Amino acid sequence: MIFKNFRVFVILSIFFSFGISAFSQSGTGSTYRFLLLPQSARQLAMGSVFYNRYDDDIQLALHNPSIISKQMHNQLMLSFIDFPSDVTSFSVAYAHDFKKVGSFTASLNYLDYGKFTETDATGNTLGNFNAHDMFGQIGWGRKLDSSLFMGANLKWISSSYADYKSIGIAADVAFTYYNKTNRLALTIIAQNVGTQITSYTDIKESLPFGIHAAISQKLKYAPFTYSFVWQHLENWDLSFNDPNDPSIQRDAITGSIIEKSKTVKLTDKTLRHLVFGIEFQPIKAFALRLGYNYQKRQEISVPSKPGLSGFSWGLGLKISKFQFSYSRAIYHPAGSPNYITIATNLSDFLKN
C-alpha cells in the first residue's frame, strides 16, 4: 500500500509539474515579490522557503497547503517582522476543520514601507505618500488516503505605492506524500499561479511563479529533522551576472568577462536550487533551527564582506498554551529581519 501511494504521488507530481509550467512563467523579473516572504519565524529559520515537515503547526501550512489538517483546528497564529529602515510586517492566521469538506486556513499579511516625501523633478516638496503591500489567503487541505494529501491556497493581492496601485489574484497547489513509518515527507508545490487584475501601469507583469519540491525526515534515533528543498523546477538557470560585481574576473586587455569553467558553472547552477534546513528538538517544548539558502547568499551578499549571508537560524519554545518562535536571517551587514511568531490553540482555553 505504501509503495502504491508513493507511485501515485510520483505520477501526480510529473503531470502536475509539466501541466502547470506549460502555462506559467518563472518568478524571475516578476512583480508582487512580497508573496515570497516567509509568513512565520519557523519558515524563515529553515531557509526562507516552505518547510514540508508533516506536523500540526499552522506556521508550516501557510506556504504548504497540502499539510493543512484537522489537527490544526482552532489554531491562531500572529507574526511580527521587523525589517531594517523601519519597514514592518505582520501576519495573522486561523485554522478550522469542517469534517465533510476538509480543513481550512485564513490569513492576512501586511507589509508597510512607511511614509515617504514626494518631490518633483527639481526637488520641490509636494507632500507625503505611503507605500504598502498586502494579501489575504484562504487555504484548503484534504487527506486523499492514509499517505497522500493535497491542498490549495487562493490569494487576493493588493499593492499601493503612492499613485501606483495594483490588484491581483493567485493560487498555490500542492501534494504531499507522508510515510509515517519512516517519518518521511515528500512535497511538490506550484506557487503563485495567477495574474494581475489591474496593473501599476498599462503593462501587466507576471507573478513570481515557481514549482518546488521538498523532502524532510525526522531521524529515528536522534532528535533531528532535516529538510532539502529543490526550488524552481521550471527554470534550470537561476544565475545572474552583475557587470558591476568586483568579484567578476575580466580580461586585462579586452575587459570582457572571463567565463568560469563548465564544472564551476554547473555546480553554481545546481546549488542555487538547493535550500537546506535542520531542526533540533531534544524535548517537545524546545527546538533549535538552522537554514542555508545558497541562492540568497549569491544574490544579496556583499563581495568584500559576505559574512554569513544566506544563513538563517531560530528557536521555538512552548510555554503553557503558547508556542513562541523567533528567527533571524542574515541578509546584509547593515541589518537583517527579526521574526517573532506566537501560536496557540483556542480549544485549549475551552477545556475544563
Image: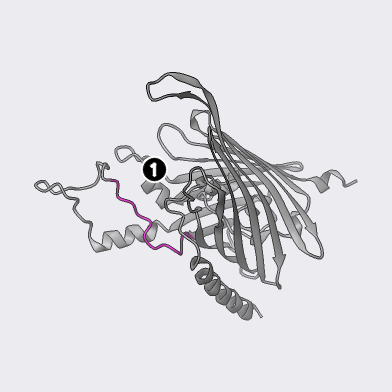
Please tell me whether mark 1 sits on a helix, a strand or a loop. helix
- The secondary structure that dominates the magenta segment is loop
Q: Is residue 120 left or right of residue 257?
A: right
Query: In the rendered image, is residue 113 in sight?
Result: no
Locate residue 336, reporting x and y percent: 48, 36
Asked whether residue 247 is drawn in magenta, I would say no
Residue placed most toward the observer, 262 or 207:
207
Pinpoint residue 262: horizontal percent, then vertical percent: 25, 63
The relative height of residue 69 versus residue 292 in the rendered view (above or below) is: below
Q: Nearer the viewer, residue 108 or 288?
A: 108
The residue under the point 62% across, 81% down is 4
Colour convention:
one colour
Q: Looking at numbered disc 1 in the image, what kind of residue is underneath it? A: Ile
Number of marks in the rendered image: 1
Please tell me which residue is depicted at 74% across the width and 54% down the height of the picture.
72
Q: Position of residue 62 (x, y in %)?
A: 64, 52
Q: Is residue 145 above or below residue 159?
A: below
Please state, as top left, top right, bottom left or bottom right, where the N terminus lies in the image: bottom right
Instruction: Name the residue beneath numbered marker 1.
Output: 300
Write the residue at 76% across / 63% down: 102
**What residue range appears in magenta?**
230-242
As drawn, 56 above or below 181: above
Q: Which quadrant holds residue 188? A: bottom right
**Furthest residue in direction top, as rendered:** 124
Q: Is residue 65 visible?
A: yes
Residue 308: x %, y % from top left: 40, 42
